[in-house]
Amino acid sequence: MMKMKSRNRLSLSSAIKNNFLFLFLAVFVSFSARAQDGVVILTDTWEPYINSPGAEQGTAAKLIDILLYYVGVESSWKYFPYEFSFYEVKNGRGLLSYPYFKTQQREGLVLFSEPIFSVTSKVYYNRAFTSAEVALSAYSSKRRIGRVAGYSYGQSIDEEVVSAVVFATEIQALTALFNHDIDVLPMTEGVMNHYLSNNFPLRKQLILAIDDIADTSSLHAIAAKNIQGKAIIKKINHAFKILSAEGIDSIQTTAAAIPDPVDIARLITSEGYPLIIGQSAADGDSIDYYTLPQGSKALVIDWSSKITEPSSTDRIYKNMMDLSKVVLLNGPHVGRELFVRNMHIELLE
């Protein structure tokens, strides 16, 4: 009888151990599957929202990574033109791509997440060649408009640029605007500010937006129309809802920095100096001198020390004659960097 009870206790103990081991293995397998769950995000460079491979992560890229991490999905990135990425997702060969504007045409082809962030797109012109009136006329008549391949600018602007000249990149499109190959160019405000500040810093004041033309639209992740696509969109939506409700700052905004204000001036003649002369260097033997029309507009990029530093005397002649560096915003020498006398510089509001 004692042996029977001992065997029963041993059997019960073994069963408990086996059940515990089974439960442990089940939890471990479940955790491992969660930890190894991953998705490849198809995207392309769209600075400052999606930065180039190897660069510091853009604001929108960081946002989607946070959402996927929260639901236990490890994300990696693959860069292709947006047209191709959309094509891959539409045909089910790619699972997830980001970010996209939501349009009626696209909505029938892929699954869209809830809005993740929003941007404002505007229509820009180069005031070195084009007035606001001419720019508005070009946009309204759908002529000499540029756009970047594969991009949407929001539904209202997209409808106006269907027949626009297509460029492969933002740099190519902006170069065309600077070269007067096109009159107007739609672009997302944050993207325009980024490229002007980083690629064309001395000419960014040449580019203006047409008043009262803007489209503020949301951007989304897109997924293939299949079971896996529905699952990943559901996870993204769930993460965004929870983290937004918690007030996580990184979820609230992807706003791009606006460039700091700059000093815009009009060049004027001075008593005794009926012409404005600009020179290619402040000093040296090889200096080119340019005659500048009165009223030329310029961006002051380097004030002379006679302006920025205090003086020990109130004699103003040297202060007037000292040189500040400007970049011309209009006239026959537009875009050229020159040194001009302080007495010729009149700041504009």
Image (cartoon, helix red, strand yellow):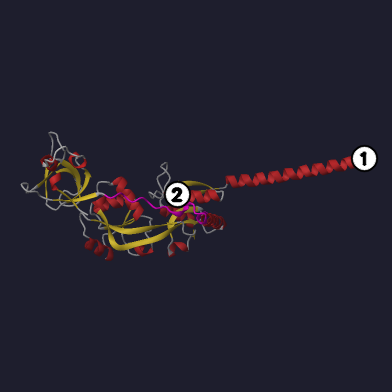
Residue 245 on the magenta span: yes
Q: Where is the N terminus found, in terms of image quarters? A: top right
Kindly identify which residue carries mark 2: 61
Residue 257 belongs to the span the image colors magenta: yes
Q: Nearer the viewer, mark 2 or mark 1?
A: 1
Q: Is residue 18 left or right of residue 328?
A: right
On the question of residue 75 being in view, the answer is yes
Q: Which mark is residue 2?
A: 1
**Residue 206 pos. (x, y %):** 24, 52
How dense is the environment of label 1, judged by Cα within 10 Å: few (below 14), some, or many (20 and up)? few
Q: Secondary structure at mark 2?
A: helix
Residue in front for this viewpoint, 55 or 140: 55
Look at the image and give the residue range highlighted in magenta.
243-261
Q: 83 or 14, which lies in front?
A: 14
Q: Around disc 2, counting alpha carbons within 10 Å, would you say few (fewer than 14), some (14 to 19), or many (20 or more)?
A: many
Q: Amino acid at mark 1?
A: Met
